[in-house]
Image: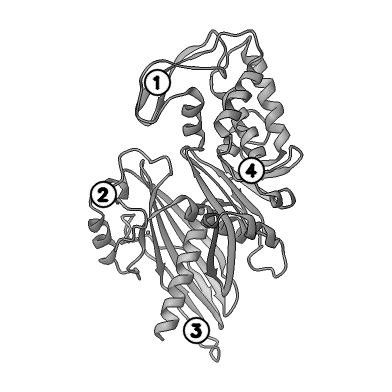
Amino acid sequence: MRKTLRNSHGNMKISKIAYPLGLFVCLFIYVAYVKWRWAFATQRIFSITETAVGMRKNQQYHEKLVTANRAVFYGIMFDAGSTGTRIHIFQFTQTAKETPTLTHETFKALKPGLSAYADDVDKVREVFQASPFLVGDDCVSIMNGTDEGVSAWITVNFLTGNLNTPGKNSVGMLDLGGGSTQITFLPKIEVTLQTSPAEYITSFQMFNSTYKLYSYSYLGLGLMSARLAILGGEEGKPDKELVSPCFPSTFNGEWEHAEITYKISGHTTGVHLYELCSKRVSEILHDKVHKTEEVKNLDFYAFSYYYDLAANVGLIDKEKGGSLTVEDFEIAAKYVCRTMEVNPQENPFICMDLTYISLLLQEFGFPKTKVLKLARKIDDIETSWALGATFHYIDSLNRQQNKVS
């Protein structure tokens, strides 16, 4: 990691560029949920044909042999972003009263996708309601940052086996996007729940369990928005040239953000680049982040720009990911900033970005020695919010159907 169209955040209109919060229009379709009675031991082969999702006709999907006491079902999720729509088709099997098992995933990307219908969401709803799939009244929505964080938490904890292993500790999730950043974890101590602001705690039901998570999305603290703030600029206002102490004094260039081109340059000074940059970043982050002590003792996975920046400077393998400490980001920032003073790099923001990540993690409450795991995939499955959101939606559909029956 969406339609009657549910909109809990006001205006449904989405601009051609992504909002800083990273609003997405998502569709979760719960497909072909088939139950077998416990007394029978029949076998069946199921296939799904991609006819109602604009994909190649007559292409048969993965076939699955189903035995007694086991059900096969599919979930289709559309992530409609500003640049296109990414389609995930998940196949699950499930034994009664147990957590589902993901057996297959098919992924496709289309352009321009559903986001091209942002000004006419009713048309999107009509398209899916005309499909042969089971479509709920609420399966189109604009996903807010907290929902995205919760869904990503579900994904990573499902893939690591923490949702179906009683007593096993869960892992936390850190996501750094362009416009916002999310932190989500399952508190183990009551003081975290008692001392955290109410809007940081969210509860939901899934797989016959109730989860009370600490989850919050910080709008404006995503990497691209943070860059603009550090530069002293404002969203949508190109204005004058932006000067930053995070660039070498001899640097002059341009930066395009949200379809606006800004002129940027370095700051003339005799002080080391890292010290000036870290001071400026600290000013931007001051009193912006809620710090929790419990994060020191929990395992965390970090995604998106955390991964990209670490891979770009060689802290982790670009394909396999890896583990590193918060201090590794700081060390890399100091080295890159010092190097840029005498040898400017292709990416003029690398000093600023690494410094920002290092200080942001410390603002969250992570000590420098804290080890974080960075991964794009777990067991060859993307660690995005898509899988978790699909699980959550399917589970809610199940509860609705059980109430009716």
Using the numbered discs, state the Cα–Cα distance from disc 3 to disc 4 in whole angstroms: 48 Å
Badge number at residue 262: 1
Question: Residue 325 sits in which quadrant?
Answer: top right
| Of labels 2 and 4, the one closer to you | 4
- Describe the colour scheme in one phrase: one colour
Question: Can you identify the residue that label 4 sits on?
Answer: 364
Badge number at residue 117: 2
Determine crowd level at label 2: few under 14, some 14-19, many 20+ residues with C-alpha closer than 10 A.
Answer: some
For marks 1 and 4, the one nearer the N-term is: 1
For marks 1 and 3, the one nearer the N-term is: 3
The residue type indicated by label 2 comes to: Tyr
Tag 4 secondary structure? helix
User: x, y (%) of residue 146?
Assistant: 49, 53
Using the numbered discs, state the Cα–Cα distance from disc 1 to disc 3 in whole angstroms: 61 Å
Tag 2 secondary structure? helix
The residue type indicated by label 3 comes to: Trp
User: x, y (%) of residue 57?
Assistant: 31, 58
Tag 3 secondary structure? loop
Tell me the residue at 48%/32% (across/down).
224
The residue type indicated by label 4 comes to: Phe
| Of labels 2 and 1, the one closer to you | 1
Is residue 198 among the parts visible in the rendering?
yes
